[in-house]
Image (cartoon, rainbow, N blue to C red):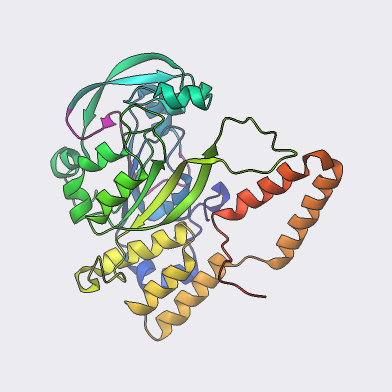
Amino acid sequence: MICENDLINKISDDELFRQTKPGLFFTHDSIGFIDVGARGGILELFDPIKSITSVIAFEPDTDECNNIIAADDADKFHSKTVISKALSDSVGVASLFRYSMSTNDSLLREEPCFVERYSISTLSCIGKTQVETTTIDTLMYGELNSSQLKADIIKLDVQGTEFEILQGAKRTIGEQTTCIIAEVSFFPAYKGQKLFSDIELFLRDFGFSFYGFLDLHYRSCRLIEKSAHNGRERLRWADAVFIKDPLDPKINNKRDVSDRQLYIIFIFSLLTGYFDYALELAQKTWSKDQEVVLIKELIGKLSFLDPLITVEEVKKLLVNVEQSPENANIIVGKFVDKRRSIQDYDDCTL
């Protein structure tokens, strides 16, 4: 996945990309990205297209909002708007519960059953504050209503209320949004929290296809020592990718998708590492003749994984194992985990 800080504008400034129809289109326009839950900074995933991205970031913590505003002095986004409000399914005031780890702050209380069962110490409530709430629809079709501010792509990471935010964005995701990254859970760490299945079914009704997870995170009671024992853990949460796929006949009709939307889905696929799909989309929709050559070269360049680099990484892995043989299972396991979400070889044969 392309997401390293040293890859700022890696795609948007690429000469090959600039020659393609998506590249030419976004020399005069920008991609609208809504980052909901921007604590710690705007999602680095978008660094490779920073210069052609207009971002609206939401973070209810005022101090954190000021940090986001002050950040990114160099290599700026096309535009950046930061709003110190919590998003939900209604406009009003709500309690923001504070936890021992600030990244777990939520509009929901913790669920003691699972917090205690899995010893999730970072979900210890230490207080609460009152925050303003609003909805994406209220903003996009109200005070932020502008031809320059769009919600083409939405990212949700709000510790348990992702479903409620989508409820308050029905018009937006129906009319504007083509791609969504949502943090989803598989058991409720917060009271009343909706799970992955609820979100997937909701988005399916709006024409979104679930494409996969960017990462996976697990939890157990940790009763078994992993350095010397094997075993599975329960899936806890992941970042899920949803796309309004114009190639899916059961959900969409590609004739109803604009060129701009096709280009956004294509670029989003590059960012999230769905390179094969990006090439398929281009070839089956707008890309013809010389454009096909450019697209293939661009994707080949962005997705290239040098086998010799992998050889060197394996050599380093062996050195680490030799230095700490008692931790071999953990060292190798982490080596595999790091590559699991972007390297799938189930359909490959040697």
Is 58 left or right of 224, judged from the image as shown? left
Farthest residue, direction left: 142
Percent position of residue 292, x then y: 43, 81
Residue 26 visible at all: no
State the predominant SS element of the stretch in magenta.
loop
Percent position of residue 28, x then y: 30, 62
Farthest residue, direction right: 322
User: Which residue shows up at 28% across the image and 40% down it?
Assistant: 163
Q: Nearer the viewer, residue 307 or 184?
A: 184
Is 59 left or right of 73, judged from the image as shown? left
Is 93 left or right of 113, judged from the image as shown? left
Q: Nearer the viewer, residue 321 or 233?
A: 233
Q: Which residues fall within the magenta stretch?
A: 72-91
Q: Can you say whether 197 is above or below 254 in the image?
A: above
Question: In the rendered structure, does residue 341 fall within the stretch colored magenta?
Answer: no
Residue 114 visible at all: yes
Percent position of residue 70, x then y: 42, 32
Percent position of residue 197, x then y: 34, 47
